[in-house]
Structures are given as structure tokens and as C-alpha cells.
Amino acid sequence: MDEGPTPPHVVILGGGFGGLAAARKLAGAPVRITLVDRRNHHLFQPLLYQVATAGLSAPSIAAPLRQILRRQDNVTVLLDEALEVDLAARRVRFEHGTLDYDFLIVATGATHAYFGHDEWARWAPGLKTLDDAFAIRRRVLLAFERAERETDADQRRAWLTFVVVGGGPTGVELAGTLAEIARHTLPREFRRSDPSAARVLLVEAGPRLLAAFDPALSAKAQRQLEELGVEVRTGTAVTAIDGDGVCLGDTPLAAYTVLWAAGVAASPLGRQLGAPIDRAGRVRVAGDLSLPAHPDVFVIGDLACVERGDGTLVPGVAPAAKQMGQYVAGRIRGRLDADSTPAPFHYKDQGALATIGRMAAVAQFGRLRLSGPPAWWVWLVAHIYFLIGFRNRLVVLLDWAWAYWTYQRHARIVTGADADAVPAADERPS
Amino acid sequence: MDEGPTPPHVVILGGGFGGLAAARKLAGAPVRITLVDRRNHHLFQPLLYQVATAGLSAPSIAAPLRQILRRQDNVTVLLDEALEVDLAARRVRFEHGTLDYDFLIVATGATHAYFGHDEWARWAPGLKTLDDAFAIRRRVLLAFERAERETDADQRRAWLTFVVVGGGPTGVELAGTLAEIARHTLPREFRRSDPSAARVLLVEAGPRLLAAFDPALSAKAQRQLEELGVEVRTGTAVTAIDGDGVCLGDTPLAAYTVLWAAGVAASPLGRQLGAPIDRAGRVRVAGDLSLPAHPDVFVIGDLACVERGDGTLVPGVAPAAKQMGQYVAGRIRGRLDADSTPAPFHYKDQGALATIGRMAAVAQFGRLRLSGPPAWWVWLVAHIYFLIGFRNRLVVLLDWAWAYWTYQRHARIVTGADADAVPAADERPS
């Protein structure tokens, strides 16, 4: 086995779009790679809202990292959580052991943030992991069950009021899907309550939905949501969230199901890297995505704060993370070949897509603007195309076709330790 | 709405095979039915071991009860847990309210039991619910992850030793599938450890596996398991289970993953019905499945202790529960028509099937005995046929075909609050 010197060790922290792209792009390179993630799976996050809303099952959008990488002999996958990076010793300390690196790629992403209101987390779950999606699925489905059991009209109304906070793509997707479930999936199944009487509110503090899109598309998205029955409240700040509901500005609203899609914060590992960070905790990297003082340490994906030529930031989306991972893999290959004058990372904007409901979406690619059915078809094809693994694509297509024709959502299964109770519901007025 | 007298109220506790069959058989009958379950879904329990072993996703074998019954107008489905039956007042008390009944069908089933060793539960999870299946999936997959991370040879061996306790159909299915996963699914994916070196032991206290089957089939099942690499230990009592492993008789065996498939106990609700119960907590019912002193209260499924003409008991299997549900629905219809001389319940034995692995199974129907590929094909067709819902059948077939050709298991996703840690693993030696 041991012929010649040991190849350099590349440690990749995180198996999301960025980390996985870096590992794959290093296939066949004369390096040893160790990819470490605290979860055993790569997650296709753009479809996570469909797991949360019972349209897809978890294995349809997730695959074990070691299965994805099983044919790439220079990769070892480990399940562990990075706790600390020792830049001087070139070593990462994990919950269960340490690894020395020659090159380090930090791709630990972001999670949702409550802008200093961490106490809102229990009332308004966010959506970043499969467990988050199960928690949201449980709350939404149990709210309709509670309404069916409830005899008091005010209580029933509060159980049938859903507030989604944040008008970005995730908020738009969640609100649109909730409205579809209430209007189309559930009505025949309840005898005492009327799910189609449910209110779904989408609240956005800024002046319009989908701020990253063209204003004309924001307006179209809002109209499509309103056609589905969503009440859109732009320019409205959520000032309080508790067990009774939310305050929109000064106006309280009784709502027992609140979902959080308003903010993200970068992984705390970023603060340990000795480099400047921005307000969201993202690490300001050099033009080649390395740390200014540590050219062998790269930060990519949602954790990286990368400025474009026009002063705007590279957005925290899957294609950007993938491009960064591929770029960094190329940098490491170049470094091994003593290529010392790299071209800086350049983000190729592949456009933006947001889906709203059946045949409802918006899309922009360069100067092209689409909405309604054409945008929806582009969204469908793009998401099926990028889904990892042939089997997943087939099953997801089947699930979607089934859901489209029947209005059914096949994953309406409530599980979890608190399967019989909405978390903390005991503290609600009976 | 209110024309004529209110129709009699049939309350069904439990949406398993028995309760669901009763509700369906009462379609169109002049009764109001309320079906109450503490979970929102009907579970196709015969395939639960495939969710536990990552072959199927949960929604493939579970469907919301209210979706199944949505077209049956005389049924209301409620999510709640029955706490107490007041036979004198003809009323059931639930966690959230009460219901008065004219007829009551108690179909709350059974759960796993540890024969007075409840402390074993944390080390050796059983398999009755979807949450149980997720817990087992998590433990099994994490054991291989731990082995990959482990540097100590003894520890690694303990992480790669799996003990299944109980040689009934569930134990046989779990052991056979675990051996297949270790030998065929995982080996290419690990770099430091060798999953195919894993030991899988199936331990049965009685003299042979599958005691309900013909002895010749028990022997064939054992041979098929051994060909898959399972070590079968019949006539061997498990005398201790803790964080280090098990004691088989007096011999300790280091094994960090122990699964329990050895015993069931009837739902505690049975003890409240004032009727005699057997050792497993099942209720001894009259020939028409009613309580001796309460002809309007029926007990069916795994909770009922029903003797056959030859003195043996009706087995706790899905077809028996279905037949009891249908019979009781017929009795209630008969009672409404003042038919006072019912034929007692008669169980039609539809044979027994147990699957072991690919192309490996045993089956007996009357005097017909099958094993190997023919039995496996019968098993496959029967289980697809009985799966509820056309979509599930299609997806399950697709999953199975995929798994068959690729040896992959698509649901190898670890989730749950303790996704990064085997429960209680902290108490294990390092």
C-alpha cells in the first residue's frame, strides 16, 4: 500500500452543496479527502419545504453521503461534529477525535436566526434540516386535527390560522402550499371543522415579496398567492410571537401555528477562523475563497461572504455553493501543481426561481422574466434535473404527478416523540 | 339536517386492521361512527421492519386514517387517546373530552413487552410504531458509523455485533435484512471498517424459529438465514441486556445494538373492561367477541383472546384482526335489525408467511408448504396486494425493484433529536 509519500490531506467540513461539490471535483486528484458532517445525509434543501408540507417523504430528497461518494476511492466519510479549528496546528477538533489537515474546506452553512428573539424559536420553527421539516409537518397537520376536536369557535379559529413570517422563496413556498392543502387536500376529510376556512398569512417586513427578484415578478408572485387564498402583508413587522399568536405591528392575531422563514445566520464555526465576519456571521474571504492569513483554509457556501464586482454579495443559494466548491477543488489541484496566480472566484448567476403552487411560479434568467405556468414548468424540470440519484428523481416525479391529479399529499404522517401533542401546546389556553 | 331520531353511535377505539375493517364494513349502515386513534395514520405493520431497515420510507406503509375514510360519510375521525371506559355510563373518557356510545369496539392492539425486564427497553428497542422503526433505523445505521470512527478493535467489534432477540416472523425478518445490509449494501462505502465482518445473531429461547410454522419450515428458515450469514441460536435464553451487550445464558457477548422482537402485551385498556384477561393482558370475549356482561361492547384484534374449536387461540395477525372487525360490524348491523341469534366468530386461517431475504421466505397454506423463491414470490404478491392505496403499491414496488437490482436501500437517512448519538451511548465505555 505505502508507496511514496502520503498524499496531502484535504478535510472538508460539511456535506451540503458546497462540500459535496468540492469532494467530487477532487475525484482522481492525488489527495486524501475526509468529508465530515454531523448528519449522515446530503439534503436537497430546495425541496425541503415539500417534506414539511407532506408532499414528499424524507428519503426522496436526501441520500447518505457515503453512498453518494462510494465509488470515489480517495474520500473517507465520517459522521462527527466539528467543534474547533486550530489554524496554527492545522488541526480540527471534533466531538469524537481530531484530524490534521493540509487543506481545509469549511462548508458548514447557515441555520435560521431570530434576530435576537431566540425565545420565538419554540413558537415559530424554521426550516433547515429534515428534523425541522418533520416538526413543521407535525404542527401543521396537528393544527387541523385540533380544530376538528375543538368545540370553542375562537379556539378553532386560532387553530386554523397559519402565519408564515418572511417573504423570501421559502416563505412564499410554504404559504402557497399551506393554502393549497387547506383549500384542496383536506376539505373532504373533516366533519366538524372546515379546513377551507383556514387563514394563511404571509408577513414580510420589507416593501415586497421575493426581494431578490425583479419588482414586476414580486407583484406577480403576490397576485398568484392571493389567488390561492393567501393574505399577503408586506411592510408589516412581526413584533411578538408567543403561544397565543403574533403581533403584526401593534395588532395581535390569534394563531397557533407560526412558521419562521425570515432570517439565517451563518454556522458558529465561522467566528473561530480569525477572519472578519459580516452581520450574519459570514466569513469575509479573499478572492480565491481562502482566509486572508491562511491560504490553505477555504470557506465556501452560505458561510462565505463574497463580494461581486458590482458590490453585491453572492447569494446564499445552492448553485453558488456548488460553484464555490468546484472552484476551491480547482484551487487545491492548482496549488499541488504549483500554480501560484489563481483567477479569483467568479459567480455565474444562473437565475432565480421561486414556486408558489400548482402552475404558479416566478423565474428570471438574465433579462428573461417568466411567471405562471411557464415558470412552473422551468422550476419542475430544473428541480428534477438537479435532484441527486436516478431513483429519487423517478419517485419524486411519480409523487408529484400523483399529487397533481389527486390533490393528495402522500406523506401526511405524524410521527415524533410528541406525535400526540403540538409542542408546548399545554401552555396554551386549554 | 335533523330528520328522524339520531342514529346509534358506534365508537371505535383504534385505527389498526381491526378498527378500520369494522368502520369500513359499516359504510352505509344507519349509524354514526366515531373512530378515535392516538395517531393520525393507519399503519401497514407487516412491512414495518422494512422502514426500520431503511428499505421503505414511512409514507409508503402508512396513510392518514381520515384520508382512507374520507368518502364514508357516516365516519368522523378524531385524534385522541382513550384513557378510560365507563361501561355503566356507556361513555369513553379521552385525553381531550368524552364520547357517549351505543356500541363500542375496542381495537387498541398490543405493544412489545419485556417480561418484567422493563429496564431492557432502552437498550433493546422493539418494533410496533413508525417511531420505533425510526429509532431502530437510527441505531443500526449509527452503529456502522461508530465502527468507522472507532480505532479500538474491541469497540469496533462491539459496534459491528447485532443481536436480535426473538425468533418469530419479526425477528427473522430483521435478522435476515440486517445480514443483507452488512454483506451487500454497505461494504463499498466504508474505508476504515468492514461492514461485511459484522455479526448478526438471532436468539430464540424456544427450540426452533417460527414456532407457529411447520417444524420442517422452521428448519428451512434457519438454513436460509445461515446462508445469509446470520448466526441462529435457538434454545438460548437472553438473561441480561445492558449498555455492554447481552448475556446468552451465562455467556456475555459485547454487542452495542440489540433489537427486541420477543414478546407482546395487550393494550392496558383491556384491563379496565371488567372481563377476565389472559397472561398477555388480552380480554377473554364471548363467542360473538362481545364482553360477557356487556353485549354492546366488542373487543377485537390483538387485544382479544379468542379460542378456536381445537383449543388454540386465534393468532395476533392482521387477517384475524380484519375478520374480527368485519364480523363485529355485521353483528352491529344484525343487532339493529333485531337479529338476536348470531353465529359465533369463526376464524378463517389464511395461512402464514415469513420473509427472510431476497428470494428467501417460508409459507404454509393448509397442507401446502413453500420455501425459498416460490414462498418469496407469494409473500411479495400478497404484501403488495394488501398494501392500502394504489400509490403506495406502485412506490413500494418501485422501491423493491430498485433495491433488488442495486442492493441499495434508499431510506438510509438518520434523523431525530439524537441524530448524532446512539441513545444513552454516553454511558458506554468511551
Image: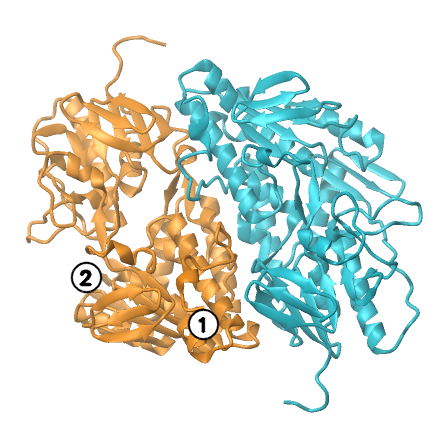
Chain colours: A cyan, B orange
Mark 2 secondary-structure assignment: loop
What kind of residue is marked 2?
Answer: Ala
Residue type at the position of mark 1: Ala
Q: Examine the rendering and report whether any part of residue B329 can be seen.
A: no
* Residue A70 sits above or below residue A398 on the image: below
* Chain to which mark 2 belongs: B
Q: Nearer the viewer, residue B271 or B157?
A: B157
Residue A100 in picture, x, y percent from top left:
67, 73
In the image, taking residue B64 as reference, residue B17 lies left or right, namely left
Image x and y of residue A9, in percent: 70, 75
State left or right for residue A293 relative to residue A76: right
Residue B212 image label: 2
**Looking at the image, is B257 positioned above or below residue B394?**
below
Q: What residue is shown with label 1?
A: B182
Q: CA distance from mark 1 to mark 2?
A: 28 Å
In this image, A379 relative to B274: left or right? right
Q: Measuring 7% from the left and 30% from the top, which residue is drawn there?
A: B293
